[in-house]
Amino acid sequence: MAEQPPPCATYRFSNNKHFPSCSDLPVLSSSLHWNYHPSSSRVDVAFRHTGVSDRRWIAWAINPTSAGMVGSQAIVSFPRTDGSLAVYTSSITSYGTRLEQGNLSFPVWDLSATNQNNEMIIYASLELQGNISAVNHLWQVGPMSENTPMMHSVAPSSPNVRSMGSLDFLSGKITATRSSSATVKNIHGILNTVSWGILMPTGAIIARHLKKFESADPLWFYLHVSCQLLAYVLGGLGGFVTGIVLGKRSHGIEHSSHKIIGIILFCLATAQVFGGMVRPGKESKYRPFFNWFHILVGYSTILLGIINIYKGFGIFHAAESWWYAYSAVIAGLGCVALGLEAYARVKGRKSNTSDNNKCSASIEIEEV
């Protein structure tokens, strides 16, 4: 049975240009059409984006050095506020780019673009370097602010983080890939949510309430230390390192408050770990000061950790399910803590009443 041509093969360009090869790209309602000339390594391309209902920018790019965004050589187009259409080349050097106009690392000519019938098309001819036909390519769509292209969505679930792949102009084979930065973001978010946001509060609840039960001694202490140490390894080490990696990969993008809180959390947690190693004995006159230090640093870490997790959700544009799920976990831990606190207070009152009754009975016997 003959292989069916892709839907893009039925498209007819209004300017009567002909592209014998095409591929419907997997995301962002886009397709790529091309005509490859092996003898000269020249390729004529048309990048088409449909479903346009507002002012936006579109771009198609080749990255000669890697599969990511940084280093890509892009062709950009957008409608200006005066109604004219901009089309130009832009070399991407950082994640904070505003798609400034500039020369590419390979020759490009015959640039043009159209914006009609709810679709935008970029046309260009370019010369591939190194006598190759296979390239890493990317395509993007983003919002506009006046005549300045703005940052596209970077949410892990957004199609914008999946708009890349490999393309062989000769064979027509296209393979979609996923940005490695998106994977690191997910790992960073999961490590920090589990460590700072779940293990740390759980360790604090264990230390405050389980130690009141004689049968739980010294189990409560080992559980408390295990929770805090595991949280430090996952968040203080794993989360901190992945945060540094993301920072280095995101040149030009700054989330200052999130980063500062993360550094403070790492310092506080490190102080707790090393403070526990030099903890004074129960009879030491310095033990009360250590206890206050331990409590103050511990609760500060928990509070800042929860705040920073929600900040991270906002930065990553996390799906609502993440917000609801984590909020439910925190609410559950809060209910457990309040329940144990209420139980401890009721038990304490009963114990005081029992002691008072015993004291009264003793006094009466002495009087008799």
Image: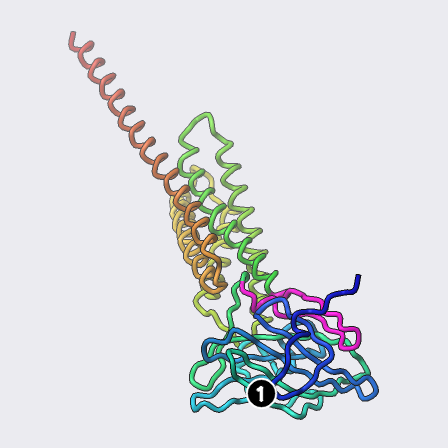
Residue in the picture at 55% in, 81% down: 120
- Magenta residue check for 170: yes
Give left or right: position of 282 versus 136: left
Is residue 305 or residue 193 the one in the foreground?
193
Q: Residue at x 19, y 10 (%)?
A: 366
Residue 131 image-quadrant placement: bottom right
Residue 365 position within the rendered picture, expressed as x and y whole percent measured from the top left: 20, 9
Q: Is residue 162 magenta?
A: yes
SS class, disc 1? strand
Q: Tally the marks.
A: 1
**Quadrant of the rendering where the C terminus is positioned:** top left
Q: Quadrant of residue 54?
A: bottom left
From the viewer's side, name the closer residue of 19 and 189: 19
Amino acid type, label 1: Ala
| Place of residue 55 in the rendered image (x, y in percent of width and height, measured from the top left) | 46, 80
- Quadrant of the snapshot with the N terminus: bottom right
| Circle 1 Cα neighbour tier, 10 Å, few/some/many (<14 / 14–19 / ≥20) | many
The answer to which image quadrant residue 171 occupies is: bottom right
Q: In the figure, 27 relative to 207: above or below? A: below
The residues colored magenta run 158-181
The image position of residue 341, as x and y in percent, is: 34, 36
Q: Could you tell me residue 71's position as x and y percent?
A: 65, 79
Is 213 left, or right, of 187 in this rendering?
left
Is 14 situated above or below 344?
below
Residue sitting farthest toward the right: 39
Placement of 62 over or under 321, stated as above or below: below
Color style of the picture: rainbow
Q: Identify residue for label 1.
A: 113
- Nearest the camera: 275 or 264? 264
Taking the view exactly as shown, the residue that stands out farthest to the left is 367
